[in-house]
């Protein structure tokens, strides 16, 4: 799918606040609300827009502790990796899980109530087929985003 400048502008705006009224998107990119709707429908159908979700404040829900965990598995075989990935996919407090290259096999980001809860969850998740893991509690969240950089658009401005 070929994206033009207006698509890029819309995608940038939608990442900031997908709940904005169509006329506001239209005012920002110079289109009518119906033209904006057609473009957004096309972008959704093409899979460029995968989902539209509400971003919740973790602290408001009692989950203010972010921990980054480095994991090395005991063996580098498909069964161990599949079992590990299945555990990560099944656990809602796992926010991110990345397979990486180097001395560690995975990086996992956990969101829990506090350090004690993080430790308890880590012990439950990282025992089977895990050789070692290192927990890095986050002192402060400097930036947390799922926004994808859109070519030719300065972040968040829509212009």
Image (cartoon, rainbow, N blue to C red):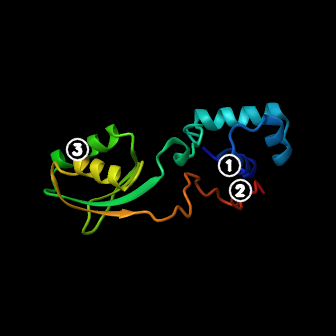
Separation (CA) of disc 2 from disc 3: 37 Å
When the figure is inspected, residue 78 is found, relative to residue 50, above or below; the finding is below
x and y, in percent, of residue 18 in the image: 68, 40
User: Which sits earlier in the primary sequence, circle 1 or circle 3?
Assistant: 1
Badge 3 crowding class, 10 Å Cα cut-off, few under 14, some 14 to 19, many 20 or more, is few
Q: Left of 81 or right of it: where is 94?
A: right
What is the quadrant of residue 14 in the picture? top right
Q: Residue at x 44, y 63 (%)?
A: 138
x and y, in percent, of residue 102 in the image: 27, 68
Question: Could you tell me which secondary element the residue under label 1 belongs to?
Answer: helix
Tag 1 and tag 2, C-beta contact below 8 Å:
yes
Front: mark 1 or 3: 1
In the picture of the structure, the residue carrying the numbered disc 2 is: 156
Q: Residue at x 65, y 47 (%)?
A: 15
User: Which sits earlier in the primary sequence, circle 1 or circle 2?
Assistant: 1
x and y, in percent, of residue 55 in the image: 58, 43
Badge 1 crowding class, 10 Å Cα cut-off, few under 14, some 14 to 19, many 20 or more, is some
Question: Could you tell me which secondary element the residue under label 3 belongs to?
Answer: helix
Question: Could you tell me which secondary element the residue under label 2 belongs to?
Answer: loop
What is the quadrant of residue 44 in the picture? top right
In the picture of the structure, the residue carrying the numbered disc 1 is: 16
In the picture of the structure, the residue carrying the numbered disc 3 is: 82
User: Which sits earlier in the primary sequence, circle 2 or circle 3?
Assistant: 3
x and y, in percent, of residue 10 in the image: 72, 46
């Amino acid at each position: 799918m070929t994206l033009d400048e207006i698509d890029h502008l819309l995608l940038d705006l939608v990442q900031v606040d997908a709940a904005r009224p169509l006329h506001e998107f239209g005012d920002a990119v110079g289109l009518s609300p119906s033209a904006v709707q057609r473009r957004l429908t096309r972008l959704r159908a093409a899979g460029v827009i995968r989902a539209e979700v509400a971003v919740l404040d973790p602290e408001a829900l009692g989950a203010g502790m972010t921990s980054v965990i480095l994991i090395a598995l005991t063996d580098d075989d498909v069964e161990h990796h599949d079992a590990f990935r299945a555990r990560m996919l099944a656990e809602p407090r796992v926010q991110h899980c990345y397979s990486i290259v180097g001395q560690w096999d995975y990086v996992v980001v956990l969101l829990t109530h506090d350090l004690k809860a993080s430790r308890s969850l880590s012990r439950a998740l990282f025992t089977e087929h895990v050789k070692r893991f290192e927990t890095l509690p986050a002192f402060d969240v400097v930036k947390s985003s799922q926004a994808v950089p859109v070519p030719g658009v300065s972040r968040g401005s829509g212009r």
